[in-house]
Image (cartoon, rainbow, N blue to C red):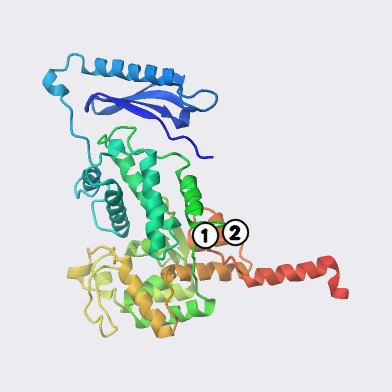
Amino acid sequence: MKRPEVWSKSVGFLPHKVSVYENAERKGVLYLAWRKDGNWKRRSLQRPLRNDRGTIDKATATWAIQQAEQQYARNVAGVPESERAPQKALTIAEGFARAFDPREGKYPTDSRHRREVERSRDVAIEYWGAEMAWADVKGRDLRRLWRARIDELRKAGEVGLRGAEVTVARILAVAQWLRDEELIPATACIASRAWKGDLRADWLALTEERKLPEPARPRYTIEESRGILRAAHEIDGRYALLIALGAELRGGQVVRARRTDLDFDHATFTVWGRGHKKGEVVKLTPGQMRAAREAIETGYLRDLEKKSADYPLFPAGQMPGGRSGKPLATVERHLNAGPMDVGAMRDFHREAEKKVGIEYIKGRSLYGLRRAAVDEAKALGASREGLQRLGGWSDTQMPDRIYADQEADYARTEARELKIKIRGEETE
């Protein structure tokens, strides 16, 4: 049984408009919300909207709207009539434009994540329209969008579940930012706390599948991983160093590393976290130390090393000698360059696959090395804490439950041998 849609109403016009809504995080108690001096003000009405059966009490709803009207009257008391004129509500297109603004937006620069948000914007405009106001987006509108998105992705040959979830999540993230910036009402575009469960239930119903799909997490064999590591130096110096230092880590974090993150005296490499992605201090192996020293002392970073104590290890931009396989970073172009785009690293990785003779599989890429490392570490009997440090995860659950091969044959073989001993079959 699905949870009822959160109820809300609005009275008056911006900037003095008052919204009344049931707060799902406060057991459905009704709240008023309005803006004052640029900040959100909220007041509990100390009364739930619904009766014991979970249905809306009409008398309470009428009373709540009256409370909002009274608050609105207080808000505009003494305000000149000319200033009470309604302000145009922010539209879907305008809201995303604010989010992408280079000076004040949530996503000021181009990135993979921003491009993902842009695709979600296109979906929102397709199904809601560019002129729809954020304040008018309700739970039913989100439901309509994700159902349409599931159908669209399925017709395109996709599974549809993850794609629909990402689309909705990106839209909700923009809505949250717009609320925080006080650009839309506090009650605009708020999803149920159970929206992901509702979406997954809809996916099962629409597809008539019996269970939710397992995420595709393709990986390399350990022999393939080692082959890529050996071939990396023939592709590009930056790619070779990236693989040497961070085959078991997140490529997007490693590529932002700088010279000061390498400590040759203590043989460590520091990877800095960002957002909810944890950082890690890596103890380097002898092979990693050789690769780092080669890149810095005689390789593509040698001129930057002579010029500065700190510089990007993986600077963006073409390098002289790159086509001949002996690139050299220049002080003028690369000393203050940004990090190389991960997409370029993926292109190098594809070249390495071809050189080793490995078949391309969508979604494997650099993450395939990481997953292969976890599989091999588990086969070698690594502790959960060791697995955690191997990949720089925030806890032990990620490598244990997600990145380890769910079909690990060695574990099945071990279970078989244990059953033989438990049942006494070795004497039969």
Q: Crowdedness of circle 1 by 10 Å Cα count: few (<14), some, many (20+)?
A: few
Does the rendering let one see residue 274?
no
Task: Give how far across and how far down residue 223 sits, in percent.
Answer: 52, 80
Q: Crowdedness of circle 2 by 10 Å Cα count: few (<14), some, many (20+)?
A: some
Task: Give how far across and how far down residue 90 sits, in percent.
Answer: 22, 38
Q: Residue at x 26, y 34 (%)?
A: 182
Does the rendering let one see residue 269?
yes
- Amino acid under label 1? Pro
Whether residue 153 is situated above or below residue 346 in the rendered picture: above
Horizontally, residue 370 falls left or right of residue 386, namely left
Disc 2 marks which residue? 384
Disc 1 marks which residue? 213
Whether residue 401 is situated above or below residue 244 in the rendered picture: above
Task: Give how far across and how far down residue 30 sits, in percent.
Answer: 42, 23
Q: Evaluate if marks 2 and 1 touch, with contact meaning CB atoms under 8 Å apart.
A: no
Horizontally, residue 235 falls left or right of residue 320, namely right
Which residue in the rendered view is the most extreme toward the right?
A: 428
Task: Give how far across and how far down residue 425 sits, in percent.
Answer: 84, 72
Which residue in the rendered view is the most extreme toward the left?
A: 82
Q: Earlier in the sequence, mark 2 or mark 1?
A: 1
Q: Residue at x 25, y 70 (%)?
A: 304
